[in-house]
């Protein structure tokens, strides 16, 4: 699924359903580009912002780390 980077609009709070409805941090975060977040954008609860960096390297690093642990066990 496509992800977008959003942050709460000034004076607004944005609960994140994928994170136990904890509020989205002031600096924002990556969220799924789904109906929930599209409504938040339309209602101006959040604004779409330039992503600080692509989240994909974090996922790759986690997989590499998991593979390294498997090698250590052998």
Image (cartoon, grey):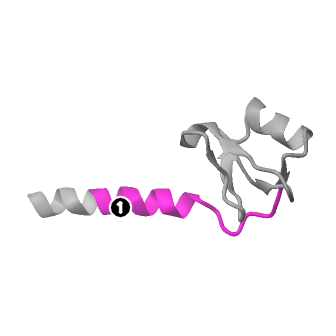
Query: Picture coordinates of residue 35 (x, y %)?
Result: 77, 30
Q: Percent position (x, y) of residue 47?
A: 85, 53
x 21%, y 60%: residue: 69
In magenta, the rendered stretch is: 48-66
Task: Check the image and name the residue furthest to the bottom.
Answer: 52
Instruction: Residue 41 in the image: state x and y as whole percent.
Output: 86, 43
Q: Residue furthest left?
A: 74
As rendered, which of 50 and 16 lies closer to the eye? 16
- Of 15 and 58, the residue lying toward us: 15
Crowding at dot 1, Cα within 10 Å, few <14 / some 14-19 / many 20+, comes out as few
Magenta run includes residue 54: yes
**Can you identify the residue that label 1 sits on?**
64
Front-most of 64 and 28? 28
* Local SS, label 1: helix
Which part of the image, by quadrant, shows the C terminus? bottom left
Residue 59 coordinates in the image, percent (x, y):
48, 56
Q: Toward which corner of the image does residue 38 lie, by quadrant?
A: top right
Where on the picture, by quarter, is residue 1?
Answer: top right
With 18 as the anchor, is 65 left or right in this view? Answer: left
Q: Nearer the viewer, residue 56 or 40?
A: 40
Residue lying furthest top in this view?
35
At 91% across and 39% down in the image, what residue appears? 42
Q: Quadrant of residue 2?
A: top right
Left or right placement of residue 15 versus residue 68 in this view:
right
Q: Which residue is found at the position 70% from the left and 69% from the top?
A: 52
Task: Say how many tags the image has.
Answer: 1
- In the rendered image, residue 50 lying in the magenta stretch gets the answer yes
């Amino acid at each position: 699924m496509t992800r977008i980077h959003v942050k709460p609009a000034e004076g607004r709070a944005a609960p994140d359903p994928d994170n136990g409805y904890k509020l989205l941090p002031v600096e924002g975060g990556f969220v799924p580009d789904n109906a929930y977040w599209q409504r938040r954008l339309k209602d101006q609860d959040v604004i779409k912002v330039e992503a600080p960096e692509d989240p994909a390297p974090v996922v790759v690093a986690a997989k590499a780390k998991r593979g390294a642990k498997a090698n250590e066990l052998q």
